[in-house]
Amino acid sequence: MSLPLTLPLLVPLTGAVLCVLLFRSPGAQRAVALGVSLAHCLAAAALFAGVRGGGVAAVQISGWPAPFGITFVADLLAAVMVCAGAGMGLCIVVYSLFALDRGRERFGYYPLVLALLAAVCGAFLTGDIFNLYVWFEVMLMASFALMALGGERPQLEGAIKYVTLNLVSSAVFLSGAGILYGRVGTLNLADLSLAVDTHLSPGLLTAIAMLFLVAFGIKAALFPFFFWLPASYHTPPTVVAALFSALLTKVGAYALIRVFTLVFSHDIGWTHPVILALAGVTMLTGVLGAASKYDFPKILAFHIVSQIGYIVMGLGLFSAMGLAGAVFFMVHNIVVKTNLFLVAGIARRLTGETHLDRLGGLCRARPWLAACFFVSAMSLAGLPPFSGFFGKLALLVAAARTGHWTVFTVAVVVSFLTLYSMTKIWTHAFWKPAPEGMPDPAPGRDPETDRAVAGMLIPVTALAAVSLLMGLGAGPCMRLALDAAEQLLDKGAYIRAVLGEGAA
Amino acid sequence: MELLFAAVVGGLYAAGVYLLLQRNVVKIILGLALLGHGANLLIFTAGGLTRARAPIIAEGALSAPPDTADPLPQALILTAIVIGFGVLAFLLALVERTHQVVPTDDVDELKGTDT
Amino acid sequence: MNSVIFRSATRYMFPILLLLSVFLLMSGHNEPGGGFTGGLVAASAFVLYALAFDTAEARRRLWLDPRYLIGTGLLLALASGVVGLLAGEPFLTAYWVNVPLPGGGVAALGTPLLFDAGVCLDVVGVSLLIIFSMADVDRGEP
């Protein structure tokens, strides 16, 4: 399994390097990016097949045995996340081929996107906490550059806030990792999982767990750390915002799930109510922030915060159903959120506007776009038969079973407010007639725009279809999520795969 | 000895956070640099402070003698320093560019994207 | 900077610094040094040249666009890791060969040295890309 475990990292990294070498020729970069993202999807599929068939897989990079070397581990959660990341990468690259302006392309857009994809897959697959820090930093560097690429004033302002807060998170992460290494003597996640019980007093361990909660909470946009997100995510071009919403916060949520199920699961009575409370407040503040906005990308940015609250709620519940709901919801959210941002991008391309008061008539002019938006929006709000319904259902069932009625109520209320938000966008941007002075979005006005929009609709349609299929095929998907949750709760399989038989 | 190092690390963190809360953007960058240095020194201190020999074993030996320094914190700190160097270089370029576009260095003036 | 002393000194220092960078790269495995510090010393050689003469002169001295250095360095580092993959071992497995030198002694060459050389080129490319770009800012070039 050594090749399938390292290919999801190597393929996009090689693609990024080739795009750097081809910096004088954007056409060649586009071809390389498309080929590499297709190859990346194949590599991710091979990894998933291997893990589904053979259980948790691990490879020791460089041949140094664990726990001395760096291990790349893939359990079902990691394999599913790598597949989701690869799929999103392909959709973003296809969309960028049609949507991106030539100026940004010239200044290294494609190497940055491919490097971001490589770092995200590295973060999903690594089994070493300092290696996780390194992949987080690579991912952040690529995202800093993508955020500021283009140099418009809102982008630069948003980038300063984004960079500063994420660097604080990195410093906190580094401190936590350093203290943990100093006390326990190992960086390997499986070895940490075995060693924390014996080496550390429970109080110190909980303190380090809170350090990691802050560090990953800033990256995952939990309350009260999320304020960099609404200030910066609506400033870059919508395709960049879609890439960020798909991957960056989800890597933070993945790191939270990994660390709190594998390493810090000793004091569940204290840590997990804190996580649950933070999740509830995150959901509420995110959706209330969205309800107060009338600008399409700004609303979606606040919804990212709210949806992260759901995922972390699944972690806080710490039952098989809760974690399964979190995994299902994370994948559903990646698909649906990206799709909503891409639709917002098409709306901006057609009309030049993002403010809901100045948009309108898109349902009559572009019915296919409206249909795709409807599927994704209703999926986000949690209506059957789309994927969002089954994700929220799993989380609510888990909350009811474990008796957490406050979080249950908050989740239901937030669902209704999300529905309000999505219907607000629908009625303003799609249903109401076009306002005075807005360029006509109907096909036929400008053949170049029509060609571009036709191309941009390809990934949008694919993502809407995926959301529909996840909903209609919720049985097998939820079974997969439950298997992933079982693997997360039973640390033995992970530890045995990394450290060899007889270790746990 | 650990106490002295811990005090220095604490001082660096305190200075870093104080500078992060300033209005001038360049002071914020300095604060981030100090925070990074504090984190690096924390790894160094947490890895154990010993007067020891370099972690290279003799030809043919199978394990290191007991007073060998731990090579891992050194590697971690080097990685963190390199990452910090790259990030600070980017941040300086970003602030330079922002100053060209928005002729101010007061963070409170950069409210345009706040919601 | 228009100083005769600085310029003459730089003309002598420049090749010595480059030689020092190669020395640091080669001796980095068992002694202080390595790809990163070697790269920084090489970059500082070019920065010294840019300070003494002109950024355009230093760019001409570098001859290649720094982005080619970055790409080649990363490709070299990745290739040194793929050697292990092709042999069926995990990524980045180290292979060493002992090459006898003509003047006596043995040189240990291996894939970690290739990796370090890639890192060195990468660091030179990145540092010079940053520094040359910022040096050109005052002239209004992007």
Image: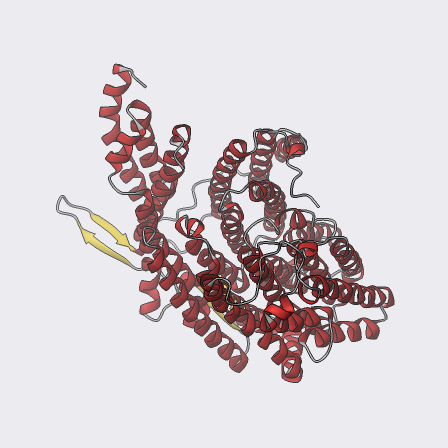
- Residue A191 vs residue B26, the one in the foreground: B26
Name the outermost residue toward the left. C102
- Residue A333 vs residue A476, the one in the foreground: A333
The quarter of the image holding the C terminus of chain A is bottom right
Residue A492 locus on image (x, y percent): 62, 72
Residue A96 locus on image (x, y percent): 47, 60
C107 vs A500, left or right, is left
- Residue A261 vs residue C56, the one in the foreground: C56
Residue A104 locus on image (x, y percent): 45, 50
Whether C41 is drawn above or below A23: the answer is above
Residue B50 locus on image (x, y percent): 53, 38
Whether residue B34 appears in this view of the structure is: yes
Residue A392: quarter of image: bottom right
C115 vs A139, left or right, is left
Residue shown at 27% from the left, 38% from the top: C23
Residue shown at 63% from the left, 66% from the top: A362
The quarter of the image holding the N terminus of chain A is bottom left
Q: How many marks?
A: 0
Whether A41 is drawn above or below A69: the answer is below
- Residue A491 vs residue B79, the one in the foreground: B79
Name the outermost residue toward the front. A436
